[in-house]
Amino acid sequence: MVYTSSFPIFSVTVDVVCLTVRDGRFQVLLVERGAEPFRGQLALPGGFVHLDEDLADAAARELAEETSVTVPAMEQLRTYGRPDRDPRQRTVSVAFLAIAPDLGEARGGSDAAGADWYDVATMLARRRRLAFDHRRILADAVGRARSRLEYSPLAAAFCSREFTIGELRRVYEAVWGVRLDPSNFHRKVTEAEGFLVETKKTSEGGRGRPARLYRRGKATTIHPPLNLRVREPAQPVRQGRRTRTT
Amino acid sequence: MVYTSSFPIFSVTVDVVCLTVRDGRFQVLLVERGAEPFRGQLALPGGFVHLDEDLADAAARELAEETSVTVPAMEQLRTYGRPDRDPRQRTVSVAFLAIAPDLGEARGGSDAAGADWYDVATMLARRRRLAFDHRRILADAVGRARSRLEYSPLAAAFCSREFTIGELRRVYEAVWGVRLDPSNFHRKVTEAEGFLVETKKTSEGGRGRPARLYRRGKATTIHPPLNLRVREPAQPVRQGRRTRTT
DNA sequence: TCAATAGTGTCTGTAAGACAGTATTGT
DNA sequence: ACAATACTGTCTTACAGACACTATTGA
């Protein structure tokens, strides 16, 4: 098929940064490219937007086609359009951020060669290569996710529908790469209006005292923001100066 | 000229939301459209991206062409791509946020029929009509600017190169639509590391005591965030409850 | 002189961090 | 019993808001 136009021709694609926390590790869903360019390299799932399709719909479709993962909602991240970012033709890519709960083992995608979860820190390491400008996109997405945790109930999207406060805390710890005080964390999130809804159930089979299960509340923003600050694993801050990021 | 492609054909445009504060009023730069569709209606400055042009460059070019305004930097806002947003053909528009200091009276654009500043509140009123989905874009931009004030030195971009703390405060008051306590504001911004750089000069010709002039510092984020809360004009909060947004 | 704006100092209440202490499970 | 995790309470300190007070100008 050949398309024609009297305006400059762009291709528009979507790329999806799908993040999760598995076993306390912050991970991203990547596919192995089955076609040129960058054949065989790791890349974010994504592809061309159809002419009659909304951007977010295209992102959800590509994610499902290539990885068989579906997520409840996606958030637009940023658009990447440097003239040289795709060697084939001028392509503008709209990136989306998706958050998935721990989905167990990786799924074979129906479309791409293979889809799997990878540690975010590893993929952001200098020497790792991702197709196109996907390393940059991943970095932007991680930054966005980290800041979203503080002001929005995003963390709950990393958990299954019902979760304990401990599970929620481990999401923060994995995404931020810090350790948090369990007591203070408990107080902050339970006092944040609309963030969590208590259920009558408790967890089972854990090592310690069973924990109450919660569901995500209706709030879309957290007031006041969690404003949690770091307690480094190696050197716990005991006394004195407040550890604000400076 | 006719372009051809074997991929679906999109047009890619940029739209610029250029905001300023003039006489204590929060305003946006709009042009009157000289061509169909939406001829004669108000719209954000913007237009088609050239094939070899970066998105941010296109935004700066269109802004300058249509309004003769230039700004030091622009920030990407969001991308709008609903299939029906342009009646001509499938168009994806990347919106940018630009902040300008008070530039005095409006300039005639060299390209569009006319460019002028309009009150943001008026243009966001329900009954106002802007071309395309530009009212939505404007609303998103205003939300972004409001939240940026708290965490970044963006407010200084609304001021000329050297400014007083009073001028800076009036930016916050205009953008947020609130009144702030001058003393506490002074303390917060002067204590925020890297936000402001003191000069030796003072303002002249004002009504009260001359104020020291400051320049923007090197910080790109403000630590800690200003976290300023509202003192309503009508009903000053004197005693008791803290006025956090709830 | 007064009005207006700039800037400093200080008090108070809220909330974050530290951490001790209690509760309830599996091993 | 002990380790592990969940949860509660309390002390201390940092910081936002209120506001009194001083400083310096123009009218």
Image (cartoon, coloured by chain):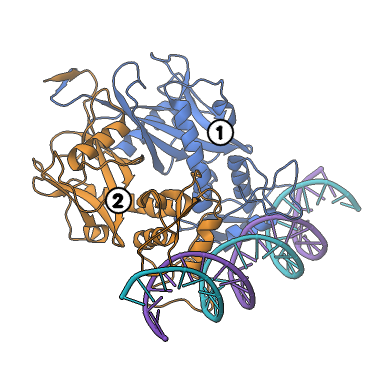
Chain colours: A orange, B blue, C cyan, D purple
Give the camera-side residue of B220 and B212: B220
Q: Label 2: which residue?
A: A19
Q: Which mark is residue B27?
A: 1
Q: How many marks?
A: 2
- Find residue A50 and report its horizontal and vertical position in percent: 23, 26
Q: Can residue B193 be spotted in the picture?
A: no
- Find residue A79 and report its horizontal and vertical position in percent: 31, 39
Give the camera-side residue of D16 and B211: D16
The answer to whether residue A164 is above or below residue B206 is: below
At a point 56% along the width and 23% down the height, the residue shown is B126
Q: Amino acid at mark 2?
A: Leu
At a point 43% along the width and 14% down the height, the residue shown is B39
Give the camera-side residue of B143 and B184: B143
Q: Quadrant of the N terminus of chain A?
A: top left
Judged left or right of residue A125, residue C12 is right
Q: Which mark is residue B40?
A: none
- Find residue B108 and report its horizontal and vertical position in percent: 48, 24
Q: Are marks 2 and 1 in contact (CB under 8 Å)?
A: no
- To which quarter of the image does residue A60 belong? top left
At a point 49% along the width and 70% down the height, the residue shown is A243
Give the camera-side residue of B37 and A131: A131
User: Which chain is disc 2 placed on?
Assistant: A
Q: CA distance from mark 2 to mark 1?
A: 38 Å
Say yes or no: labels 2 and 1 on the same chain.
no
- To which quarter of the image does residue A65 belong? top left
The answer to whether residue A103 is above or below residue A85 is: below
Judged left or right of residue A200, residue A98 is left
Q: Amino acid at mark 1?
A: Gln
